[in-house]
Amino acid sequence: MAEIDKGLPSNTRTEVKVPGEEQVDVQEEIVEKGPVEVTPEEDGGATIDFEPGAINIPGTENHFDNLADILPDDILEPIGNDMVQNFMDYKASRKDWEQSYTSGLDLLGFKYENRTEPFQGASGATHPVLAEAVTQFQAQAYKEL
């Protein structure tokens, strides 16, 4: 078997000797990193933070910050206008579908109404399984008829 040093190398050059083989030199680059924070967990595991304190450094911008608070108005205004225009285009493209969906619910007998009985705001919901069964029956009967 090869004799391998179990300790971490203190230099950037490691020699590996294998009996019956020619000698191989391996170059390693050791990059010094910042401090590493290890937090033991209750279940025996550990949480390792390679950059402790990198998130939420006071006075710096965080990845999770609200961009609307950071970006200037001359950048936010075109983005907002584009978003509003895209939403309006989306709503307009769905208009035919919404009308057919609404008329389909009317044909199935589903009506939205503000109920006041037995009390104001009471739900007028029907059982979804019944609604699904009626819809499936109608779809199958339409093909057959």
Image (cartoon, rainbow, N blue to C red):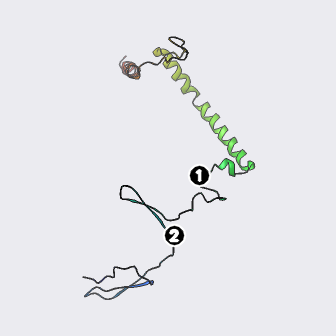
Horizontal side of residue 27 vs 114, given as left or right: left
Q: Is residue 110 above or below residue 68?
A: above
Farthest-out residue, front: 42
Residue 91 or residue 52, whichever sits in front: 52
Find residue 37 and report its horizontal and vertical position in percent: 48, 65
Residue 77 or residue 96, whichever sits in front: 77
Q: Which residue is mark 2?
A: 35
Q: Is residue 89 above or below residue 14?
A: above
Q: Which residue is mark 1?
A: 64
Q: Residue at x 45, y 83 (%)?
A: 12
Find residue 32 and report its horizontal and vertical position in percent: 51, 75
What amino acid type should be assigned to the residue bearing mark 2? Pro
Of the 4 image quadrants, the one containing the N terminus is bottom left
What amino acid type should be assigned to the residue bearing mark 1? Phe
Where on the picture, by quarter, is residue 92? Answer: top right
Horizontal side of residue 84 vs 14, given as left or right: right
Q: Residue at x 74, y 48 (%)?
A: 73
